[in-house]
Image (cartoon, coloured by chain):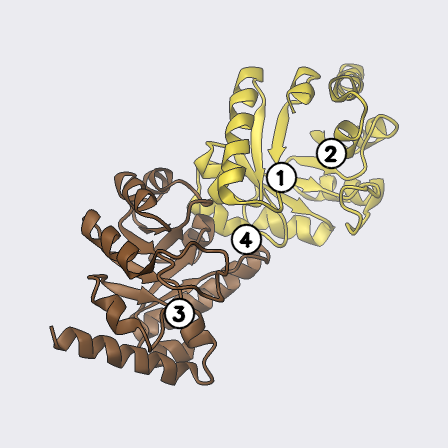
Chain colours: A yellow, B brown
Amino acid sequence: MKEALEGGATSIQLRIKEGSTRYMITVGREIRALTRKYGALYFVDDRLDVALATDADGVQLGPDDMPIDIARELTPNLIIGASVYSLEEALEAESRGAHFLGAGSVYPTPSKPDARVIGLAGLEAIVRSVKVPVVAIGGIGESNIVEVLGTGVVGVAVISAVMGAPNAREATARLRNLIDGFISSR
Amino acid sequence: MKEALEGGATSIQLRIKEGSTRYMITVGREIRALTRKYGALYFVDDRLDVALATDADGVQLGPDDMPIDIARELTPNLIIGASVYSLEEALEAESRGAHFLGAGSVYPTPSKPDARVIGLAGLEAIVRSVKVPVVAIGGIGESNIVEVLGTGVVGVAVISAVMGAPNAREATARLRNLIDGFISSR
């Protein structure tokens, strides 16, 4: 995770599906300290309690997690991201008050093999249909990040492209260079 | 769960270890509605987020869950129960601000086969050593509930004695009768 921050990641998400709450809080505190040091954001997947306990910037909530509107009501100071896998889910999440959307899967991905693949066209339809910022998720890497950015998303979220790379810092730096290049060419 | 309330249970705990947050909230809402109807308390095991989302009266936090002092700080309106398995843990939980303790296991129990057994003597030592109320947990049933109440606990928590009984309402009613009998004989 430190390597990703050194490579230029602007946000880190804590995502632990198995493990005790105490363990999640321990790891979350490390992420909070490091993201502060590097000026990055820190989000927690699913667990609003862990987000509160570790002073996260926000939570990322999918269809099986806490409903967006309840999270907004309970934690007005957290940034609430919604993970959406269709245009319908995107519109629903926006109407319930999501601050931003993580939309995908743009491509098939080993990190979430069962996720529905919406493709570039599906992603673009979501970006055009909502007012909140959209972050692209699912199967994004060096080979396709520029075309993903072309859909109008404000960012991309990756797991495999960095965690599956031989050198996480360098993999992140290459993605970051591609993003910076895309932004300066607009 | 309705049967336990009909039988006279004064508190119900939501305890789901596997399953999505959305599912826990769905079940929690049912417990909240029923406990309101029966005038009983509603607690959530471990998950402070689910407790907040379902308007629980409190959370029950064990050694692997969120630290007691953090939960107190985050949710000043929730009753915070600490699950403790030794005198040392009991004193620690009290010093961190637990409102009450669930202490055990008093006896071996099929619901938590790996739990440390502290016995009646261990339970009594905890009751004598802390100022907060203590609820006895672990292996308690009709055959031993009166001797457990004799240690000075304010209540008992059961799983197997009710959920493992052929008729949960009647099993709860029998336990409740034994408690009421103990109280009126003091």
Residue B72 image offset from top left, x and y in percent: 32, 42
Pointers 4 and 1 in contact (C-beta within 8 Å): no
Q: Nearer the viewer, mark 4 or mark 1?
A: 1
Helix, strand or loop at label 3? It is helix
Pointers 1 and 2 in contact (C-beta within 8 Å): yes
Amino acid type assigned to the residue bearing label 4 in the image: Pro
Q: Which residue is mark 2?
A: A159
Residue A33 image offset from top left, x and y in percent: 51, 22
Gap in Å between the C-alphas at discs 1 and 2? 10 Å
Nearest the viewer among A161 and B155 is B155
Tell me which chain the residue with mark 2 is part of.
Answer: A
**Which residue is rendered at x = 41% and y = 49% of the image?**
B62
Dividing the picture into quarters, in which one does residue A162 lie?
Answer: top right
**Which residue is rendered at x = 52% and y = 63% of the image?**
B26
Tell me which chain the residue with mark 1 is part of.
Answer: A
| Image position of A22 with respect to B180: above or below | above
| Image position of A35 with respect to B17: above or below | above
Neighbour class for label 4 at 10 Å: few (<14), some, many (≥20)? some
**Are tags 4 and 3 found on a single chain?**
no
Helix, strand or loop at label 4? It is loop
Gap in Å between the C-alphas at discs 2 and 3? 40 Å
Gap in Å between the C-alphas at discs 4 and 1? 18 Å
Q: Which residue is mark 4?
A: A67
Task: Answer with left or right where residue B135 lies relative to residue B131.
Answer: right
**Are tags 1 and 2 found on a single chain?**
yes
Q: Which residue is mark 3?
A: B33
Nearest the viewer among A134 and B145 is B145
Query: Label for residue A15?
Result: 1
Q: How many marks?
A: 4
Amino acid type assigned to the residue bearing label 3 in the image: Ala
Gap in Å between the C-alphas at discs 2 and 4? 24 Å
Pointers 4 and 3 in contact (C-beta within 8 Å): no
